[in-house]
Image (spheres, rainbow, N blue to C red):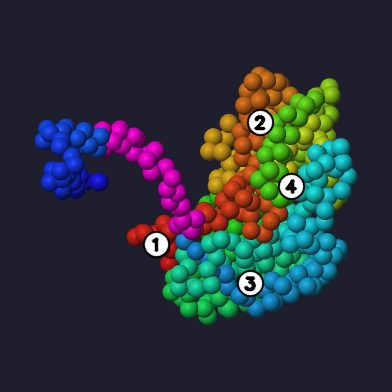
């Protein structure tokens, strides 16, 4: 009760009681009573002010930040010929083999086998033999369930074109198909998208797509060259393109991790896997999974194999001749799990899926070309290459430098520190199984989409619109 109200109440009581013949109190008694009540109120007020402000309001919930503060995504509903029909006709996508099993399970492929005793039993269901070219299907399934997807294009920051460019061109890269065959699907999708009002509003700078192959499969300069000319076609210039290998000098190319075999079902799967690879007993200094290129003059892989086989038991080789290692095997995984370092030369192009298989297993990659990783996957890997990898220039190896000697110079403490950095970044280089993502951990898909939304926000600033 406020002091004035208390005084009024006491004064009223005093007046009434003083008129009573049954009570005869001295006037000073009422004054002392008034002072006592006022002193109690002052004490309570001072005590309340002494309580820290954050304690007094700790029962109020903290405001929740907007998970879509960078913007929202509108997904075009394309004619089925650009995606679903390609999946429906998966047996026709490859001149030699059916692609249906590889593209099953939402792009994760067939469930992994032969892993009992290699990985923790409770994590085996999180493993698949995922195809390295299935990225388009994985991204499409995830983005349809993304928390920042909007059905209202007017509220979108980014527009996703779910065209399976890699699957569409795949079967036309070999045999006797013409350049017109290789270009047909890309010409069709660009004709379709340029008829959309939101494309015309920005000339495509706020649009993005996935292209599940390397960028060079879409950069044919001359008719007699490899691939399609999709990226060079009018209309494609301003589209942000997510690819498993980018052209480092093209701003609109963004390199994203190759799909590997580990697809965690929960945050718990991530933590358990990190704990497993962190505490794994590794008995081999380094390893190499690959095969020599007999038809290639001065084949660099052959040099690596020779060094590995001459390393007196300190190096382990997995022979990947033919297609034995195309989508992962238990032998590759076990080799990476048992090795401190894994050799990662360039593949048929500058990158290779093995980089991510190696790092998921907690092995430290050894690179020989900067373009194999450092200039490719900046959104997904540590900023400091030395913190998680070893670089030995290929010319040093050609001139006789011993890889074994270089790696043996690292102390156990240095190796442990580098491995810990690799393990820290595992979530950013894998694709989770749930179509709506993990509980709190961001995987490679989340990192890629966040990056696209962020750069589209930047495009809205003066000087960023590419037209």
Residue 173 % position (x, y): 74, 64
Badge 3 element: helix
- The residue pinned by badge 4 equals 262
Label 1 SS: loop
Closer to the chain start, of discs 1 and 2, is: 2
Residue 419 — which label?
2
Q: Which residues are magenta?
A: 43-69
3 vs 1, front mark: 1
Q: Residues within 10 Å of mark 1 (few under 14, many from 20)?
A: few
Residue at x 74% of width, y 62% of height: 106
Give the Cα separation between the discs numbered 4 and 3.
Answer: 31 Å
Q: Give SS at disc 2.
A: helix
Which is more N-terminal, label 4 or label 2? 4
Q: How far apart, in angstroms, are the residues tagged by discs 1 and 2? A: 39 Å
Q: Residues within 10 Å of mark 2 (few under 14, many from 20)?
A: many
User: Which residue is disc 3 drawn over?
Assistant: 186
């Amino acid at each position: 009760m406020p002091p004035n109200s208390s005084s009024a109440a006491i004064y009223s009581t005093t007046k009434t009681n003083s008129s009573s013949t049954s009570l005869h109190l001295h006037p000073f008694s009422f004054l002392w009573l008034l002072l006592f009540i006022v002193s109690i109120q002052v004490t309570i007020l001072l005590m309340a002010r002494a309580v820290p402000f954050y304690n007094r309001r700790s029962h109020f919930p903290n405001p929740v930040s907007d998970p879509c503060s960078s913007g929202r995504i509108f997904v075009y509903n394309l004619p089925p010929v650009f995606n679903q029909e390609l999946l429906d006709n998966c047996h026709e996508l490859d001149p030699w083999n059916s692609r249906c099993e590889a593209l099953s399970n939402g792009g994760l492929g067939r469930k992994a086998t032969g892993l009992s005793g290699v990985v923790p039993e409770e994590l085996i269901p999180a493993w698949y033999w995922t195809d390295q070219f299935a990225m388009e299907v994985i991204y499409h399934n995830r983005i349809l369930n993304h928390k920042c997807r909007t059905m209202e294009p007017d509220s979108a920051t980014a527009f996703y074109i779910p065209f399976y460019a890699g699957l569409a061109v795949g079967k036309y890269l070999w045999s006797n198909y013409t350049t017109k065959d290789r270009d047909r699907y890309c010409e069709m999708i660009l004709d379709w998208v340029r008829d959309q009002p939101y494309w015309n509003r920005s000339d495509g700078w706020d649009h993005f797509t996935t292209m599940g192959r390397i960028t060079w499969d879409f950069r044919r300069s001359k008719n007699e060259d490899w691939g399609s000319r999709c990226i060079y076609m009018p209309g494609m210039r301003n589209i942000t393109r997510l690819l498993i290998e980018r052209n480092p000098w093209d701003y609109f190319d963004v390199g994203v991790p190759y799909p590997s075999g580990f697809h965690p079902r929960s945050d718990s799967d991530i933590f358990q896997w990190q704990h497993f690879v962190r505490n794994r007993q590794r008995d081999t200094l380094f390893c190499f999974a690959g095969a020599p290129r007999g038809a290639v003059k001065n084949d660099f892989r052959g040099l690596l194999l020779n060094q590995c086989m001459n390393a007196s038991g300190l190096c382990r080789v997995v022979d990947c001749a033919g297609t034995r290692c195309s989508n992962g095997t238990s032998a590759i995984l076990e080799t990476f799990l048992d090795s401190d370092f894994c050799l990662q030369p360039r593949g048929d192009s500058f990158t290779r899926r093995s980089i991510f298989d190696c790092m998921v297993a907690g092995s430290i990659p050894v690179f020989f070309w900067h373009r194999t990783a450092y200039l490719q996957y900046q959104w997904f890997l540590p900023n400091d290459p030395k913190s998680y990898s070893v670089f030995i220039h290929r010319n040093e190896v050609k001139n006789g430098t011993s890889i074994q000697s270089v790696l043996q110079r690292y102390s156990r403490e240095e190796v442990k520190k580098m491995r810990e950095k690799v393990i820290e970044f595992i979530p950013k280089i894998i694709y989770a199984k749930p179509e709506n993502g993990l509980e709190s951990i961001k995987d490679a898909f989340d990192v890629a989409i966040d990056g696209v939304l962020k750069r589209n926000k930047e495009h809205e600033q003066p000087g960023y619109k590419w037209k």
